[in-house]
Image (cartoon, rainbow, N blue to C red):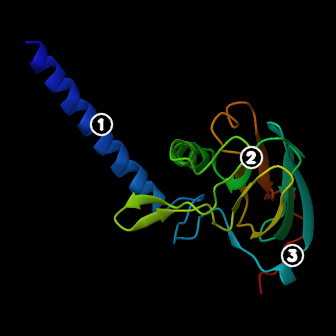
């Protein structure tokens, strides 16, 4: 009887692992955070020449400065992101649901040794199956070691309620996220060209 119970547990564990793997692989194809070929629906990579606003963002140990950001719809923004903390941190533009799914990928990076508390093993790539590789190189996200600085140039869509967040395991849960408000239909005074 015990071997049958253990056999069922092993089968359930295997099937659960396969289901989770399929979910992670299918999400990776549309991920806002790691190696996706598709553009996220949260906006698109912008051109530096079209940036009309520069926002400096400090990544500190489990909070951002500033904590909230407001931009105009269709605006192209240059983010200058500095990790002034002692740990690895991420700046990622997305929706709450996107961040929740992305956190699973970040956990996998930790489990595979790509991501340490204060170090990123950038030479490592993680096989997601079906030819998909995970690397942290999407235009709406940067992952920085302590003391590093990077830039993101991002053109925002029509009005939206987004978040910027750090999805390193435990950081989002500790409050390392902020609201990113794109325009407000009743309050927009400037509508910028995207040409």
Label at residue 16: 1
- Residue sitting at 80 percent across and 56 percent down? 184
Q: Which one is nearer the viewer's eye here, 180 or 4? A: 4
Label 2, secondary structure: give it. loop
Q: CA distance from mark 1 to mark 3?
A: 46 Å
- According to the image, label 2 marks what residue? 88
Point out the frontmost of discs 2 and 1: 2
Point out the frontmost of discs 1 and 3: 1
| Upstream in sequence: badge 2 or badge 1 | 1
- According to the image, label 3 marks what residue? 51
Q: CA distance from mark 3 to mark 2?
A: 27 Å
Label 1, secondary structure: give it. helix
| Upstream in sequence: badge 3 or badge 2 | 3
State left or right for residue 4 relative to residue 144: left
Label 3, secondary structure: give it. loop
- Residue 101 location, x and y as percent? 53, 46
Q: Which one is nearer the viewer's eye here, 47 or 143? A: 143
Marks 2 and 1 in Cβ contact (< 8 Å): no
- Residue sitting at 78 percent across and 80 percent down? 47
Q: Which one is nearer the viewer's eye here, 147 or 163? A: 147
């Amino acid at each position: 009887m015990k071997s049958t119970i253990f056999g069922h547990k092993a089968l359930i564990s295997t099937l659960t692992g396969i289901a989770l793997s399929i979910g992670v692989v299918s999400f990776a194809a549309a991920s806002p955070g790691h190696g996706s070929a598709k553009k996220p629906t949260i906006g698109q990579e912008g051109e530096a020449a079209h940036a009309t606003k520069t926002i400096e963002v400090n990544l500190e140990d489990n909070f951002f400065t500033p904590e909230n950001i407001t931009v105009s719809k269709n605006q192209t923004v240059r983010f200058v992101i500095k990790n002034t903390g002692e740990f690895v941190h991420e700046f990622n533009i997305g929706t709450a649901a996107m961040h929740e799914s992305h956190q699973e990928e970040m956990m996998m990076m930790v489990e595979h040794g790509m991501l340490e508390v204060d170090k990123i093993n950038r030479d490592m790539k993680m096989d997601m199956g079906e030819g998909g590789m995970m690397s942290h190189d999407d235009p709406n996200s940067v992952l920085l070691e302590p003391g590093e600085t990077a830039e993101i140039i991002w053109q925002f869509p029509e009005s939206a309620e987004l978040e910027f967040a750090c999805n390193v395991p435990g950081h989002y849960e500790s409050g390392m996220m902020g609201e990113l408000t794109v325009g407000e239909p009743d309050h927009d005074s400037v509508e910028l060209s995207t040409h």
